[in-house]
Amino acid sequence: MSTTATPSPVDVALGDLARECATTRRVLERAPLDARADWRPHPRSMSLGDLCAHLVNIPNWGVVTLATEGLDFTGPMPPRAPIPTTTAELVAGWDVQVAALTAALAGADEAALGTTWTARAGEQVVFAMPRGAVIRQMVLSHMIHHRAQLGLYLRLLDVPVPAIYGNSADER
């Protein structure tokens, strides 16, 4: 019989958060925001600057999820991080947002992760799910999705793409 304690759901979430945020930071460090913020790969795509600003705000969604019962998209929205205009501002803003989410998650317990969080548009429920699922889907998975977009932007801009879940064509 193993004597290793099973990690709590909060500990598992903190580990996932730390790994994925560190990887995202490496991708953000390569974003040529200073010179190419307006660049977009297609007219319907977000600009590089908009994509980076969106990414840097995603951790705040987790903070809001852990601090509130829900959010009504027709009402006042939580404050957003300042829009970065340089890569240095982008990475610094990312670090601030990730630290806030890490602290909020570290202060949560299993019961808090199991309580329902509801997103609304007025009276219409957009979704209602346990906070832990919101953190997994709307924060971590959403961040990973947009990090992948940013990786494609880097490739199209001929910027070396960092290794993410293994080697990239540019980094081992």
Image (cartoon, rainbow, N blue to C red):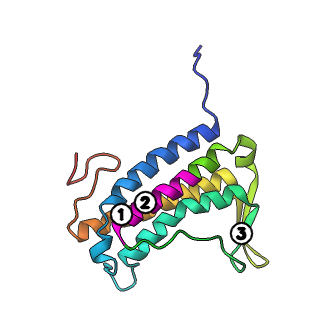
Q: Residues within 10 Å of mark 2 (few under 14, many from 20)?
A: some
Q: Quadrant of residue 1?
A: top right
Q: Quadrant of residue 120?
A: bottom right
Q: What residue is shown with label 1?
A: 88
Q: Amino acid at mark 3?
A: Leu
Q: Is residue 40 magenta?
A: no
Which residue is rendered at x = 60% and y = 54% of the image? 135
- Secondary structure under tag 1 reads helix
Q: Answer with mark 2 or mark 3, whichever residue precedes in sequence.
A: 3
Q: Amino acid at mark 1?
A: Ala
The residue lying furthest to the top in this view is 1
Q: What residue is shown with label 2?
A: 92
Q: Residues within 10 Å of mark 3 (few under 14, many from 20)?
A: many
Q: Are marks 2 and 1 in contact (CB under 8 Å)?
A: yes
**5 over 33 or under it: above or below:** above
C-alpha span from label 3 to label 1: 31 Å
The span shown in magenta is 86-100
Q: Amino acid at mark 2?
A: Ala
Position of residue 35 in the picture relative to residue 102 (left or right):
left
Q: What residue is shown with label 3?
A: 71
C-alpha span from label 2 to label 1: 6 Å
Which is more foreground, mark 2 or mark 3?
2
Q: Quadrant of the C terminus?
A: top left
